[in-house]
Image (tube, rainbow, N blue to C red):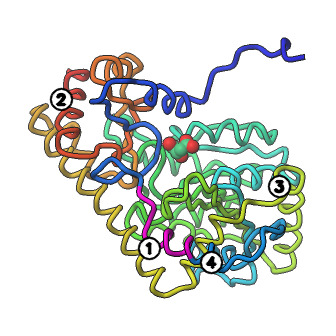
Amino acid sequence: MFEKFEATPQDPIIKLIGMCRDDPRLEKIDVGVGVFRDSNGQTPIMEAVTIAEQRLHKTQTTKSYVGLAGDEVFNEQIGNLVFGQSCAPDRVRAVQTPGGCGALRMLSDMLFRIASDRTVWVSDPTWGNHYPIFRQSGFNVQSYPYLDRETKTVNLDALMGKLSTLGQNDIVVLHGCCHNPSGAELEPQNWDEIAQLSAKNGFFPYVDFAYQGFGRSLEDDAYSIRALASAVESMVVASSCSKNFGLYRDRVGCALLLGNTPAVSDIARDHLLITARSSYSMPPDHGAAIVAQIMTDTALRQSWEDELTGMREHMLSIRKKLSGRLREKAASDRWDFIADHRGMFSLLVLDDKQVDRLRNDYAVYAVAGGRINIAGIKDSDQLERFADALVAVTT
Ligand code: LMR
């Protein structure tokens, strides 16, 4: 049977994780996969998570099934966190999924049931896994312009120009905040414009929302979604708790949909549940139960928000330091954009040779194209060495 398979390339980010793990060089710097690390190079378990987990162990009495939609307290809380007051809550439906990736795929499969002839548009560049996810559902996937590779800012003219040509036959995948891989962000007025375009021309907004709280704040990062939700009849959001709760391996995500009436939303939700049933059936409970505990306990929620703010500020301070040191070492302002980007990532726009040299000669692990995870630089020693390596491979 299996001899029919042809060799297939690994996902580049997954491959990089393995290569970095297997590299014996102690001085290696891992700016590859999008995982937050603190100044000790650790991915901490958040304090609120530890406490909620302990409570859970003390109070949980069964491991019986929860249900297809997962934890309903979690679902309601994530619905509020994402949509805020932007739309009538009875139009929103939320289904817990295994990670944000699970939400992306379930929403995509659900949409394919009724919109198989539509084109899915992803940004250029985008997270590498977007293509396989939407293609596996069956969609034709195309890209719209996003990043100006010279300035490393959003190419607004090209973006808006393209979006204004899309309509009823199109689904547009937008990064709600902290664009992956570029780090280049849209401003609130840009989101207002996109929302108006969608409402006027009918393209369907599909928001990937994996980094809420990593950009500006929990509220500000949701501006994108709320602008859309107050303008359009329907949309979907794939939300993730991997990064903002640090629950990576517990696989905690949420598929959210907004329908034009509660009755329409109910039926759409049923289709989402049927889609899940024929895939993983029911989502894992543990991580979502932790999030539900945190979100409904005033003290834990405050602790979580404070720690999240600390993580965001840590990444911002690395951005500032790194761009400052690069300005001195390269005697140029070409890396100043790193301080202006938001979230974990910046796309440095490097070619394959430069990325290979970083890895082979300097033990620096960056994703193809030169995506770096800012939080991978743990201290000033690594920062100096990273900056030296970058200057060496780019001059
Ligand atoms: C990333 O972009 O590095 C993260 O979203 C992890 C992943 O699964 O790729």
- Mark 4 residue type: Lys
Determine which of the numbered discs, if any, sits on residue 118 in the image.
Answer: none
Q: Which residue is mark 1?
A: 304
Residue visible at 56% across and 62% down in the picture: 241
Nearest-to-viewer mark from 1 and 4 = 4
- Mark 2 residue type: Asp
In this rendering, position of residue 309 left or right of residue 226: left
Nearest-to-viewer mark from 3 and 4 = 4
Tell which of 252 and 330 is nearer to you: 252
Q: Which quadrant is the N terminus positioned in?
A: top right
User: What secondary structure is found at the residue carrying circle 1?
Assistant: helix
* Residue 284 appears in view: yes
Residues in magenta, as a range: 44-54
Determine which of the numbered discs, if any, sits on residue 388 in the image.
Answer: 2
Residue visible at 56% across and 33% down in the picture: 14
Sort mark 4 into few (<14), some (14-19) or many (20+) by Cα contacts within 10 Å.
few
